[in-house]
Image (tube, helix red, strand yellow):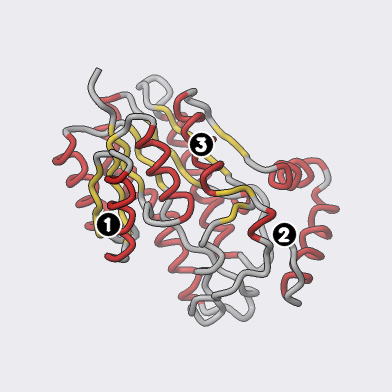
Amino acid sequence: MATPTVLITGGTSGIGRACALAFGRAGYRVAFTGRDEAKLTDTAHALTAAGIANLPIRADVGDEAAAERAVQEAVARFGGLNVLLNNAGISMRARFQDADLDVIKRLMQTNFFGTVFSTKFALPHLLASKGSIVGISSIAGYRGLPGRTGYSASKFAMNGFLEALRTELLDQGVHVLTAAPGFTASNIRQTALAADGSAQGESPRDEGAMMSSEAVAEEILKAVQQRKRTITLTGQGKLVVFLNKLLPGLSDKLVLNHFRKEEKGVDVG
């Protein structure tokens, strides 16, 4: 059996980098994208040191041409593609009434269209290998979160896109997984956009109390191996999704209270 290949978008930090190492250790050749040359190089060195064949690709998959090039480079280097892991994403932390519209546009371009573009160009290769398409979604894709209107919108859009695509591909052998990591220790909060589009910096959450990126990566790898439809991680994440279905009114109040504490800088881990 030929050695499988995974392409991970946004693979230079957080869950993406952890997935690169987890899939690599499981026997995959790893192609990964990122926008920061230094982080690409650092991740490539870490993979090489672990004995993992890898290909760093400098690309912003929110750009259609760059997404197409990333897929082409991965296939050219490794001869095919077995898993596309759509992980590239940015978040926000600002009330909608205060946020520049450009912030919402940037989130949709990266989180949603980055997934659409990458999937479009990877699909012919995944049909050939009967491989997997993975979307790293969020609890915010099941329950709209205050202060994260654009992020929630992008993840709801991703979820709908992947659900429709899964149904289209049911009889064609391609597996589609939607993974909602829940509240995870990841740099996405440190790079979340403020109302004016600048990086937030410090996170009000206690990172040490959250599930690690490495633990999330292992769960995603396992879900791909088992060809699961969806996974929701962390007890808190599962509870949020459950309460939103069962008691939406109560969920509104609880989530708003949580957000108000966050706005005041209270540890909400």
Packing grade of label 3 (10 A; few <14, some 14-19, many >=20) is some
The kind of residue on which mark 1 rests is: Glu
CB contact under 8 Å: marks 2 and 1? no
Query: What secondary structure is found at the residue carrying circle 2?
Result: loop
Query: What secondary structure is found at the residue carrying circle 3?
Result: helix
Residue 57 relative to residue 206: left or right: left
Picture coordinates of residue 10, whole percent (x, y): 38, 54
Q: Which is nearer the eye, 15 or 101?
A: 15
Most extreme residue toward the top, as rendered? Answer: 1
Residue at the image point whose x is 22% and y is 57% from the top: 65
Task: Tell us which disc is closer to us: 3 or 1.
Answer: 3
Residue topped by disc 3: 218
**Looking at the rendered structure, which numbered label has been put on residue 88?**
none
Residue topped by disc 1: 64
Picture coordinates of residue 205, whole percent (x, y): 68, 64
Q: Which is nearer the eye, 259 or 33?
A: 33
Quarter residue 98 falls in: bottom right
Packing grade of label 2 (10 A; few <14, some 14-19, many >=20) is some
Residue topped by disc 2: 269
The kind of residue on which mark 2 rests is: Gly
In the displayed structure, 260 sits above or below 249; it is below
> Which quadrant is the N terminus positioned in?
top left
Picture coordinates of residue 124, whole percent (x, y): 25, 33
Residue at the image point whose x is 82% and y is 58% from the top: 254
> Which quadrant is the C terminus positioned in?
bottom right
Between discs 2 and 1, the one toward the N terminus = 1
The kind of residue on which mark 3 rests is: Glu
Residue 50 relative to residue 184: left or right: left
Q: Which is nearer the eye, 92 or 124?
A: 92
